[in-house]
Amino acid sequence: MTELSLIESAREFNRFYTNFLGLLNKAYLDTPFTLTDARVLFEIGAHDGVNAGALARDLQLDPAYLSRILKRFREEDFIEATPDPADQRSQILTVTGKGRTQFEELGRRSNAQIATRFDTLADGEPQAAVAAMRTIRAILDPQARPAAAIIRPHRAGDIGWIVQSQGRFYAEEYGWDLRFEGLVADVAGKFLANFDPEMEYCWIAERAGINLGSVLITNGGDGVAKLRLLYVDKAARGLGLGKRLVNECIAFSRRKRYRQISLWTNDFLHTARAIYQKAGFRLVSEERHRMFGPEANGQTWVLDL
Amino acid sequence: MTELSLIESAREFNRFYTNFLGLLNKAYLDTPFTLTDARVLFEIGAHDGVNAGALARDLQLDPAYLSRILKRFREEDFIEATPDPADQRSQILTVTGKGRTQFEELGRRSNAQIATRFDTLADGEPQAAVAAMRTIRAILDPQARPAAAIIRPHRAGDIGWIVQSQGRFYAEEYGWDLRFEGLVADVAGKFLANFDPEMEYCWIAERAGINLGSVLITNGGDGVAKLRLLYVDKAARGLGLGKRLVNECIAFSRRKRYRQISLWTNDFLHTARAIYQKAGFRLVSEERHRMFGPEANGQTWVLDL
DNA sequence: TGCTTTTATTTGACTGAGTCAACTAAATTG
DNA sequence: CAATTTAGTTGACTCAGTCAAATAAAAGCA
């Protein structure tokens, strides 16, 4: 049996969110659709070809009520229903062009509603809220399949994010002091200030608007590419993002005809080391340091291309 | 404008949670209460002595509809309504003993419903879900944030936050390119790398764990303190945070016996300029520049201490 | 002060979202 | 192949929720 205070907290949230959703659903006020209409149209639009039964189950609607909604949608020419050849009782529902237009309009309104709310928030708050939503969904919805992570070049704010997340992570996990964050900021700042798009690059791993990881290649001169600031957020470990990021670096460096990639890391970062090793990097030197407080073993690895 | 993929994620969560709440609200199926009845009774039970107006506002109900629900509750002897002595139009609502019994029964059902769901989860998952719910609530519920903003010294991650938020803000609002974020990272990195706690300082304005603003004083040598990177997030404008941050700078600089504070800003930052002016700063020079893309007027202001 | 406007709540008059039961017709079972 | 189950539809209804107008106290104003 779960602890009572947890349940009470969950109920409190549910009361709050019932209100919040009620507010958002006013987006449909001056459309010919009710909330239920919108949910139905959305579901058909999103899963083209569903049948009425599945729809009723997924949206928890009365079949009779749903049937009437679908009838209206058919009359209004928003959807088409063709009998399922595999089961003549069942019918396959698809949106028409007209229905899709409506579907998209509803989406726009819904987006605008949320955007308005998000725009009153502090920088980073929407990201934090969405990350929390994803957490809840992953826990409560057994069918939730997380969106795929993508890898993209950096844009405004990303470099700051790198400084922040690494600064915080190394402080929390390894007790490194703020000089480390200073170093990261310095590296990142120089990268931006002297950015040479021909020979340098920054990759950001992102999932649904939330940054998960980063790496960059800077020109070390003499044909050597420097791989720097490889990082994968706690929330995304084990998805192979680190490997994907390093592979991007290697492919880029090959394309740009660097002759070698060199990187500096610390021995306690086992996961990172495993990635480097597997990619063919070799350890060329190692030295004890106390650059950021606690003693550590700095290592230099290189990969000949 | 918030990023689209974030908004889409939030909508996806909302669709999911609409379903989820629909499921939970079946707890009222075999009671004489509708969901709205339950919400009303709960609200009166939780905030004994509310009036109808506040109730209608908080639960976003039609006053007419609410009035009828309250009438029924009075007839059933669940609540009592006494005219507010301070305002004879308004009435103070309290639950009776009978009403409290009902209220508690509803609570039990609601708890049981959630407990059933939670009991299917892995160890630690309910805790994680509830923590995420708190996060969302703290961000989205304007009433759940009576927390005052505090001003504190920087710690791990804060400097990165400064880079990120300013980088993003100036890009979105003024179209400045990434060289600006590079400059901020450089300034911030140098601050950390050469940090002299005797003569330098960073202030972070924070509310409920979320950073809202920043400023720092660096030693410009020759008795001159440099005020840098003043920033207040859009979610916290108008609260006087900018002024408080600048006042911290002035007090600190006086204490450390600097003879002057100098700062560089741009003319279009009206709010900041007003703060500097009011604090006694005077404009000493101005020059056009294109350091970050669009043309702008850089200004140097000083305050003699 | 008295007149006008605003605010808190109630009442009248609807309507249409959602429900329940019965029905048709195709598919499945044994 | 008769009996049962499943997918969807139709009839008949009701009650949650809405909109406009009324009441009456409070607040604003000239």
Image: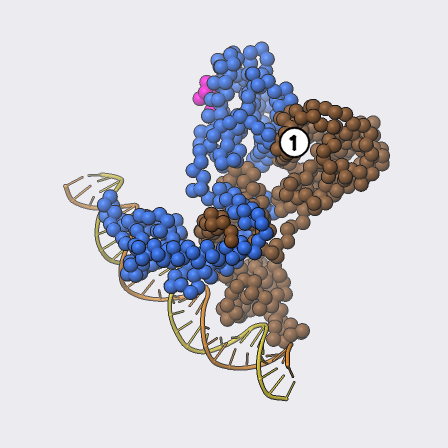
Chain colours: A brown, B blue, C orange, D yellow
Farthest residue in the front direction?
A: A1
Front residue of this view, candidates B202 and B64: B202
Can residue B187 be spotted in the picture?
A: no
Can residue A300 be spotted in the picture?
A: yes
User: Residue at (75%, 42%) from the top-left corner?
Assistant: A243
Query: Where is A151 relative to A30, above or below?
Result: above
State how many labels appear: 1
Check disc 1 and give the amino acid type: Tyr
Please provide percent x and percent y for residue B83. Answer: 24, 50
The image quadrant where one finds the N terminus of chain B is: top right
Front residue of this view, candidates C26 and B265: C26
Q: Is residue A230 within the magenta segment?
A: no
Query: Where is A135 relative to A45, above or below?
Result: above
User: Residue at (64%, 72%) from the top-left corner?
Assistant: A84
**Quarter residue D8 falls in:** bottom right
Which residue position is annotated with label 1?
Answer: A174
State which chain disc 1 sits on: A
Query: Where is B52 relative to B222, above or below?
Result: below
**Quarter residue A287 falls in:** top right
**Residues rendered magenta in the picture:** B275-280
User: Residue at (39%, 61%) from the top-left corner?
Assistant: B33
User: Residue at (81%, 27%) from the top-left corner?
Assistant: A285
Please provide percent x and percent y for residue B82. Answer: 25, 51
Relative side of B73 to B156, left or right: left
SS assignment at label 1 = helix
- SS majority, magenta: helix
Front residue of this view, candidates B174 and B203: B203
